[in-house]
Amino acid sequence: MRILFVEPVMFRSALIFLGAGLALIGCQSPQPIVVPAPNGLGGQGLVLSGTATVRVKPTLVVLKLGASFSDVRPVEAKLKTDKTITAILAALKKAGVPAEDIQTTSFKLAQNDPQQGGGWRCSSVLEIRVKEVDSASRVLQAAILAGANQINQVEYTVEELQEVRAKARDEACAVAKDKAEQYAQNFGLKLGSPIYIEENSPRGWFYGANTLTQSMSVGENLAGGRESDQVLSSGSVEVMLTVNVTYALPNK
């Protein structure tokens, strides 16, 4: 496996975000690339694969966080949650996050299980799009210090992946070719042309938006003063691509 490090690509404003756990939304499976076999090669072949990994810095971080409180009365549970959400919004504004990059994605007010103490729980979740990736830890810390006690997910997104994917493809093809030549040398084989090529695209790739997102869950009920660096590290997004190749083995 070969690993490349490349610079992040330019940001595109129109994004489609992927869900938790690297789920694929609206992703279409790529069709295999098939190279017809030359005449006279029969059905013999050497089947192998090549895999390459490219790591790039994310160009967008999406934070999904909020507040959740319980009380014997539903109105009190809602008041506590609303008060904390208001404080979080003020902290995000102070941290430089534009209002248009913040939206409420979930609100819930429901009775707790009587066997777990009863009462009511109110929860509200915000989605925050941080376009200045290096400031994501600072934004998360501001939300936590403002009272956020529910951190659902952190998503790292890379956009405009064509160049990154092309580099991974070149490396994967080189690995497959090196393998084929090594097998041919060790077993005294005569290699023909590839008769079948199939590409397995990176997990998390969304073709419609040309983006890739990887997620991490950081749990709930964080302490109000917890340092954000303990739960968030931007790191890199990994693009792994595999090429499966079948080489013809002509009769000697």
Image (cartoon, helix red, strand yellow):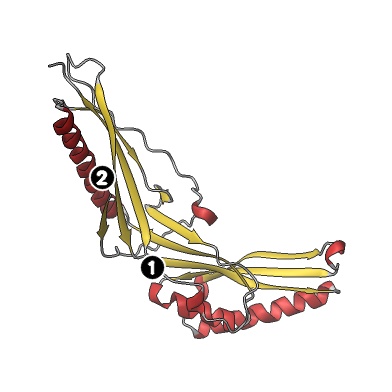
The image shows residue 196 at horizontal and vertical percentages of 27, 28
Q: Which residue is mark 1?
A: 235
Dot 2 falls on a residue whose secondary structure is helix
Q: Which residue shows up at 39% across the image and 63% down it?
A: 13
Residue positioned most to the front: 186
Dot 1 falls on a residue whose secondary structure is loop
Q: Name the quadrant containing residue 68.
A: bottom right
Q: CA distance from mark 1 to mark 2?
A: 23 Å
Residue type highlighted by circle 1? Gly
Above or below for 120 versus 76: above
Above or below for 176 versus 21: above
Give the mark nearest the N terminus, 1 or 2: 2
Q: Which residue shows up at 20% across the image and 43% down it?
A: 174
Q: Which residue shows up at 23% across the image and 39% down it?
A: 176
The image shows residue 236 at horizontal and vertical percentages of 37, 64
Cβ–Cβ below 8 Å for labels 1 and 2?
no
Residue type highlighted by circle 2? Ala
Query: Nearest the camera: 18 or 235?
Result: 235
Q: How many marks?
A: 2
Q: Which residue is mark 2?
A: 172
Quadrant that contains the C terminus: top left
Answer with left or right where residue 249 lies relative to residue 133.
left
Q: Which residue shows up at 33% across the image and 46% down it?
A: 241
Answer with left or right where residue 134 lies relative to residue 179.
right
Answer with left or right where residue 157 lies relative to residue 175.
right
Q: Residues within 10 Å of mark 2 (few under 14, many from 20)?
A: many
The image shows residue 146 at horizontal and vertical percentages of 60, 83
Above or below for 100 versus 226: above
Query: Nearest the camera: 10 or 135?
Result: 135
